[in-house]
């Protein structure tokens, strides 16, 4: 039995060697995408499904798009009675909230334009009553028919006479002097108060309600080449050493990648191997850790199918995050 066992192992290694497919001509392909936050989860799932046997995702970088920021202006116009700055602030408000369904933000007053509106005139009768006394007779010739006050001409419209002093003649009291009041009037033209047409401009920076992210996905294209039959003899010769190396590589092949979120997107910080016995990933000593404590984990399709529904753990110092593996890509916060 031992002889058969030792015979079978080399035979199997030779058979594996003869049918082994090698990877060569590695090339990178970069694709760029603009994705809104609301579509991000769907996008990540779709991207993960783009991997094939010859096209592998090498890295996914994410950064905020400059299109998330803009400058907006709005204008408001009112007719008011007082153009004093404080009154304008009271009427209009110093700030305005902006939201057009795409962008939102707070805008401040950046300019004020004022136009004076003349509202015409109206006429008003102004009356002056002047008193007099010690007139010797009540003749209108003694009364001024017009007078000027404050550069305005007033016209006599009535005189009221009454006895000032009297004397007795034949037993009757007869006015000796007169007093009374002179009534003058003029028509004044008075301007209605001015009003003001005020236009206020508000401006400021706004942010997109549904942010846009720039994604850069780097694929690694690997062309498969099958060994030809005439390579059997050399493979057999080197199988004793070469196959051991190949098997070691296959056994230790990385199948899980951890990315750290930075201000320039997600950066690969660790590649490791998950298995039935090893479902924990320690990133305590990794460089380029995330300031926001946000990380992404991606497993390849083979180990995903193998561990689907299992719980895996991300360990960072005394922190631990458990994930039930239902997708091959997750973003987590430790």
Image: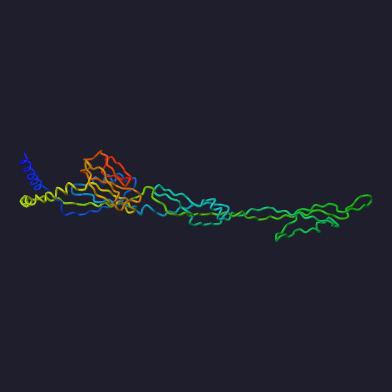
**Residue reaching furthest to the right:** 170
Which image quarter holds the N terminus? top left
**Residue reaching furthest to the front:** 2
State the image quarter where residue 188 is shown: bottom right
**Residue reaching furthest to the bottom:** 151
> Picture coordinates of residue 172 (x, y %)?
92, 50
In this rendering, position of residue 324 left or right of residue 11: right
In this rendering, position of residue 34 left or right of residue 222: right
Q: Is residue 302 above or below residue 165?
A: above
Q: Residue at x 62, y 55 (%)?
A: 191
Q: How is the image coloured?
A: rainbow
> Picture coordinates of residue 203 (x, y %)?
45, 54
Residue situated in front as seen by the camera: 184 or 11:
11
Q: Is residue 213 above or below residue 146?
A: above
Q: How many marks do you count on the picture?
A: 0
Residue situated in front as seen by the camera: 322 or 115:
322
Q: Residue at x 79, y 58 (%)?
A: 143
Residue situated in front as seen by the camera: 271 or 32:
271
State the image quarter where residue 204 is shown: bottom left
Which image quarter holds the C terminus? top left
> Picture coordinates of residue 111 (x, y %)?
49, 57
In this rendering, position of residue 176 left or right of residue 61: right
Residue situated in front as seen by the camera: 91 or 139:
91
């Amino acid at each position: 039995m031992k002889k058969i066992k030792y015979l079978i192992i080399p035979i199997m290694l030779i058979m594996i060697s003869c049918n082994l497919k090698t990877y060569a001509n590695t090339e990178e392909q970069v694709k760029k995408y603009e994705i809104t936050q609301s579509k991000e989860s769907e996008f990540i799932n779709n991207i993960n499904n783009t991997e094939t046997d010859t096209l592998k995702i090498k890295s996914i970088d994410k950064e905020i798009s400059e299109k998330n920021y803009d400058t907006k202006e709005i204008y408001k116009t009112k007719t008011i009675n007082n153009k004093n700055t404080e009154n304008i602030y009271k009427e209009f408000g110093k700030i305005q909230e902006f939201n057009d369904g795409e962008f939102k933000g707070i805008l401040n007053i950046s300019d004020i334009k004022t136009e004076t509106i003349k509202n015409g005139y109206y006429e008003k009768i102004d009356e002056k009553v002047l008193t007099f006394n010690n007139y010797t007779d009540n003749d209108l010739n003694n009364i001024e028919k017009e007078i000027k006050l404050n550069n305005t001409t007033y016209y006599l419209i009535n005189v009221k006479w009454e006895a000032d002093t009297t004397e007795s003649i034949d037993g009757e009291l007869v006015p000796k002097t007169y007093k009374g009041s002179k009534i003058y009037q003029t028509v004044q033209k008075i301007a209605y108060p001015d009003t003001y047409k005020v236009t206020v401009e508000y401006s400021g920076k706004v942010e997109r309600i549904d942010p846009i992210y720039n994604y850069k996905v780097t694929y690694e294209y690997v062309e498969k080449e099958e060994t030809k039959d005439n390579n059997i003899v050399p493979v057999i010769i080197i199988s004793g050493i070469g196959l051991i190396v190949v098997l070691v590589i296959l056994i230790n092949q990385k199948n899980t990648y951890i990315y750290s979120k930075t201000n320039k997107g997600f950066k690969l910080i660790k590649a490791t191997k998950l298995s039935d016995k090893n479902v924990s990933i320690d990133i305590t000593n990794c460089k380029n850790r995330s300031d926001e404590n946000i990380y992404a984990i991606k497993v390849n399709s083979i180990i995903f199918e193998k561990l689907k529904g299992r719980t895996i753990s991300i360990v960072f110092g005394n922190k631990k995050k458990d994930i039930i593996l239902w997708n091959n890509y997750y973003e987590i916060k430790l």
